Amino acid sequence: MLPVGELMPRVRSYSLPVYKVYRRRFYVLFVFSFLAFNQCLFMLTFSPIYKSAEKHYNIGENTVDLLLAWGPIFFIPCLPLSYLLLNKRNGLRYCIILLSIIELISTIIRIIPSIAISSSNVKYYSISLPFLHVGQILNAVCGPLVMAPVSQLSCLWFDTNERTRATTVAIMAYNAGSTTGFLLGPSIVNSPEKVPNLLYVHVGFALCACILSLIYFPGQPPTPPSPAAELLIRNSTSEIKGNSWRSYIESLRRCFTTRSFVLLVIAGGLIGGTYATWISLFDVILTDDNYYTEKQSGWFGFTTSLAEIIGGLILATIADMPRFHRSFKVFIIISFICYIIFVGWFNLSIKTLFYDKPVLPSSVVTIAFSVGLAGFFQGAASPLTYEMLAEIMYPLPESLSASILVEFINITSLVLLFIAPNRYQVVNFLILIIIGVCIILVSLTRFTYNRRDADIRKRSILVPSDVGSIHETQMNSIRTLSQIDPNIDTVQTNTISPSSFVNPIIDLSDT
């Protein structure tokens, strides 16, 4: 019988990627989230204070609506350019630097009239309006730069078990901008002459975010946190040598010929666009013969947005648990079903297209609960949709699937905004039909976890079938030759060769 030592296989070392995460990923996510928060906050500047803005600038309600509508109008044509920039080498850094500078410039432009001329001057109104439009248009151009990278940033910097939460934080930071806007604007602007004060506050926010971005914002981690991130970095490098537009068109063709992607992106675009339009109409829906004030409708909007953020964070945390990694379809369908229930409750608690008075008892509490829980479940499903589209279309860049989804959301919102002014009751009822259609579309979608499967395959160490003859204790020793702790900046390895960072390959040729 051979000695135990002679049964131990020799191990050859090959230089293979070592997957690790860095603490700086939280700084990267914070800066990106701050910029996304600012972009939404600045876009919503005048809508919550539209009465004061109308008096201060001597403009009408249509002008205030146009200042907000520049967002989806410029989002659609600018999105492809943002995608191409994002998928260059260090593209994320270029996007963030460009985003921070444009945001700062847009806020400065809006306050130039207040600095250069007195509001009592008769020319103040005619001078101010072009500056307001230019500032809002520049901020609208930033929209794709904060919405397209959300899934790609989480893949590039975060481990597999953190990606859904990171995507959720990036998306919800944008939503938090609108939530804050409904409170910040009215709290600062209590009279028309205070409107410039709000613009100065926005300049301060933009300046802080710009300084943080310029001081430090790495384009990518030193080493990838996962095989998916490794492929993303490699593809962005090779993109420099290829034809970016040709690659982009080919990628779009692959997306729109993938049945699962088309079904899910239509569902996500419809439900996201109608939700955004619906909550923006609260002041009209609830104050038009429904006995609620504008102030109360503003608080209902705040409650809905806050609940949306909480719902997204809670479900993302659950979805990141290993036992629920393949339960996204169930989570999305359950969220949509709960969403339609509470939207239905809301419709039965107010005057609608079919009823002259509420069917169910209505009060501030019931309305707040119905819209709050509707926002909770809509927010819960939204980040999972982004992540699932990235899974289905892997190995295409995550920013591509996110871009297409956001494009559909903005198109839906833009169409409904043209319907909404005189047909808000139709929109209020239409959201029920759209949610029902989306539930059917998601049910028909085949969910495939291509990115997660690729991560698992590449992380696995292939072991020959005849290795079972080796004693179990010897196998345990071999399995621990390379161990990575994904939560710290150092890699723990038991080195077996002069080179660091190796994965063992078992050699049984002499046993």
Image (cartoon, helix red, strand yellow):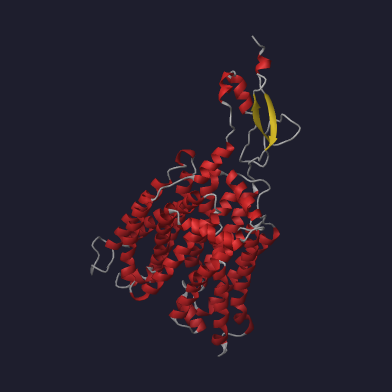
Residue 228 shown left or right of residue 287 in the figure: right
Residue at the spot 74% in from the left edge and 30% down from the top edge? 497
Residue at the outermost top position = 1
* Screen quadrant of the C terminus: top right
Q: Please report the residue visible at 60 percent of the width from the left and 59 percent of the height from the top.
A: 86
Residue 416, how many percent across, how many down? 39, 70
Q: Is 15 situated left or right of 106 in this image?
A: right
Residue 4 in sight from this viewpoint? yes
Q: In which quarter of the image is the N terminus?
A: top right
Extreme-right residue of the structure: 498
The percent coordinates of residue 364 (x first, y second) are 33, 62
Residue 46: tell me if it is visible: no
- Left or right for 326, reference 245: left
Q: Position of residue 236 (x, y in %)?
A: 63, 54
Q: Nearer the viewer, residue 501 or 316?
A: 501
- Where 29 falls versus 129 (above or below)? above
Q: Where is residue 289 in the image (x, y as percent from the top left)?
A: 29, 72
Nearer the observer, 395 or 189: 395
Residue 223 sits above or below residue 237 on the image: above
Q: Residue at x 57, y 35 (%)?
A: 460
Viewer-proximal residue among 157 and 448: 448
